[in-house]
Image: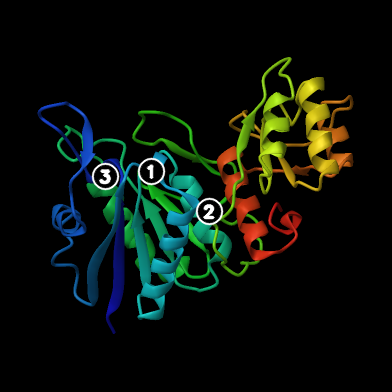
Amino acid sequence: MTTRIRILTTGGTIACTQNPATGALEPTLSVEDLIGAAGLLSPAKGYEISGLDLLRLDSSSITLADLDLLVAAVRSEIKDGADGVVLTHGTDSLEDTALALDLVHDSEVPVVVTGAMLPFDATGYDGIINLRGAVQAAADPANRGRGALISFASRLLSARGALKAHTSDPAAFHTRSPLTGPRPAPVRHRSLGRLNVPIIAAWPGAPGDAVDAAVKARVDGIVVEALGAGNVSVGMGEAVARALTRKIPVVIATRVPYGPVSLAYGGAGGGSTLGDLGALSAGVLGPGQARITLATALAARVDPATLFV
């Protein structure tokens, strides 16, 4: 029996080389280039590895509409008989895309996201080992039913709770959640591209202007990147309260890398107060993943609380 692995590319550092004229990193490698560089043109007997270029973007530019495209592409590959799907991606928003795939992934087929911290023409290029590891994870029957995963620096992580914790370390990706941790039931994928869900950062003494402006702009939901375990200033807390009275869903995340949002403190900007008013805790999800989760829930027309487990 042949194990079919499909590799889908979106650009990112793993596909970048340095422009000799400007010194800037630009995505230039195709999926065939990556497969060849990783020595996957002649895989082990019983394996069939092929690929498709979907996008050539820096992942900081990937939109919610692009995520719709990626979800559709992964589903198409599975429908066509792939036994595993690998997605190569830039590291700036890799964990966001991985969670977007995970939240709607209702198949047993493994989906594995990977990338690189160094460009193809740099000494120590890590794209080859990361791509090989992702293909191995996608082909491993033990990963069936685990949803979307991240393979990076010889580690396999759950998409849920993953974070990029370093700007340059080859082992940049860490996790707030174990591989066997809770995963909410997948929801139906509906278009994310029409939604507007901003992330608004808090700082000590911040006014509520940014939250009020978001409400005036008629956003679909708001994620607050709060302080500590989920607290904001009095001024921002009062603005969040106003947003909640307007029935705009608000999720409280934190700028702290590790530990869950607990919504424990009182006062106008305290997490407990905001929770009592209807704000949701992001739990172990960082601000970016909280945004993806809220947008997915709104698009699927399900209670957002069901996805923040």
> Which callout, 2 or 3, points at the residue further toward the start of the chain?
3
Residue that sits furthest to the left in the current view = 20
Quarter of image, res 202: top right
What SS does tag 3 mark? helix
The amino acid beneath tag 3 is Ile
Residue 106, image x, y percentages: 55, 72
Q: Residue at x 51, y 74 (%)?
A: 107
Tell me which label, 3 or 1, sits earlier in the chain: 3
Which numbered disc flags the more N-terminal residue, 1 or 2?
1
Residue in the picture at 23% in, 46% down: 15
The residues tagged by marks 3 and 1 sit, at their Cα atoms, a distance apart of 11 Å
Name the front one of labels 3 and 1.
1
**Residue indicated by mark 1:** 59
Relative placement, left or right, of 45 versus 277 is left
According to the image, label 2 marks what residue? 99
Q: Amino acid at mark 2?
A: Leu
Foreground: disc 1 or disc 2: 1
Residue at coordinates 41% horizontally, 61% vertically from top-left? Answer: 70
